[in-house]
Image: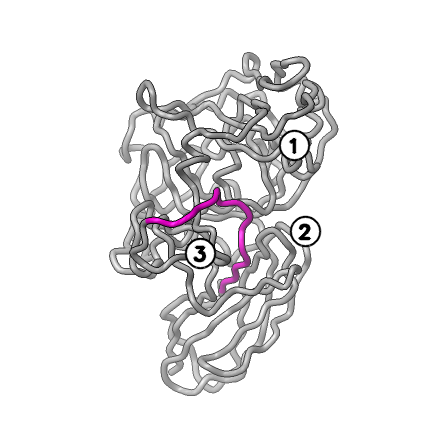
Amino acid sequence: MVDLSRRGALGALAAGAVAPPLLAQGLTRLGFVNGERALVGGFPEKGAMIVQRSRAPVLETPWDVYARGVFTPNDRFYVRWHYSDMPLSVDVAAFRLRIGGAVNAPRALSLAELLKLPRVEIAAVNQCAGNSRGHFTPRVAGAQWGHGAMGNARWMGVRLRDVLDLAGVKAGASAVRFAGLDRPPVDGAPWYAKSLSVDHARNGEVMIAFAMNGAALPMLNGFPIRLVVPGWYSTYWIKALDRVEVLTGADDNFWMAKAYRIPTTPDGGVAPGTKEFPSTPIGAMVPRSFVTSVADGARLPSGAPLSLNGIAMGGDAGVARVDYRIDDGPWVAAALEADHGRYSFRRWTAVAPPLARGAHRIDVRCTNANGLAQPNVAAWNPSGYQRGVIEAIRVIAQ
């Protein structure tokens, strides 16, 4: 039974930057120049996390967590807030989800009313659009994430379509805008808000979630409710959702018209240094895959078969296959484990032939159900979004 009765106070964050009771537990290296970050414990409802920024919190999941299972534990699930004026507590009795704009009957739903709607559950990856930004070459501005700005969970909630039906979407509506309890830092700054087309919002998969992995959402991950947009980057997964507005025209707010946009090129990339180009709001995720059983830079025994495993995601489609290769050898199909749904991580395994002594590169590549495979060359854009290139680790056999 998911408990939504708590107020979820986060007193440790109210004080501001990293300070007691937050406890440094050492450094971690993210695999790029100047990629050392503190591993810190003590954030409310969280274990040790990689700190990219303490307030508003930007916390990365340590890489070893992904080797432990296909679902990311709530207490190690990454965190990304834009504004420091974020909810530190929620009075669940007084909370209301407001639905307005181009609707027949504006509503202000309590959590109790929301929970009376039919419930659905879906496994889906939540991934920051800038995940792996620190690996872009040349480097770009923004949070210098390693690969840990992603997580996979079983999300439980209610269909957004059912909530919209309670208010009645008017004919001619074109989009649905969402915002949460976080507030701009100064008057006149844009509220953090994102929108989906009406058809997307009503597709039956987009949900308002109140639980992840069988428990209430952690406060840092959007308690008491958040939007879940399976297959799309987390910029649309509004945390602490409290406002839904149906629009009759294009959404011209800053976070749609100016921010979180990528080049309109097929791969979302432009030549490094390019500043002027047609752009479009970022949307669906692309395939990705990783080795999780062997660390980059590991020293391995030579002359013995090498067991490999890892995770893959298909983006907005299921994982169809995963292949690996050693150095510039042939691609070899890996075995796929249980399928938790088209939007979930999927575990892969393989046993590679013995490695000769010396340095080696191990590549892994995912192909999704739409036939889209990870490319050999990374697409570059000035925001460091949508990285999907084949990732490699380097090892030494001895």
Against 39, residue 196 (above or below) is: above
- The residue that appears at 52% across and 37% down in the rendered structure is 236
Residue occupied by mark 3: 387
Residue occupied by mark 2: 341
Picture quarter containing residue 197?
top right
Judged left or right of residue 14, residue 100 is: right
- The residue that appears at 53% across and 45% down in the rendered structure is 283
In the image, is residue 96 part of the stretch drawn in magenta? no
Residue 11 placement (x, y as % from top left): 37, 24
Instruction: Give, as a three-letter code, the residue at label 2.
Output: Gly
- Helix, strand or loop at mark 1: strand
Judged left or right of residue 339, residue 56 is: left
Residue occupied by mark 1: 157
Q: Earlier in the sequence, mark 2 or mark 3?
A: 2
- The residue that appears at 63% across and 26% down in the rendered structure is 173
Predominant SS of the magenta segment: loop
- The residue that appears at 66% across and 60% down in the rendered structure is 369
Residue 140 or residue 59, whichever sits in front? 140
- Disc 1 versus disc 2: distance between alpha carbons? 17 Å
Picture quarter containing residue 41?
top left
Judged left or right of residue 253, residue 32 is: left
Where does the magenta region start and end?
A: 276-290
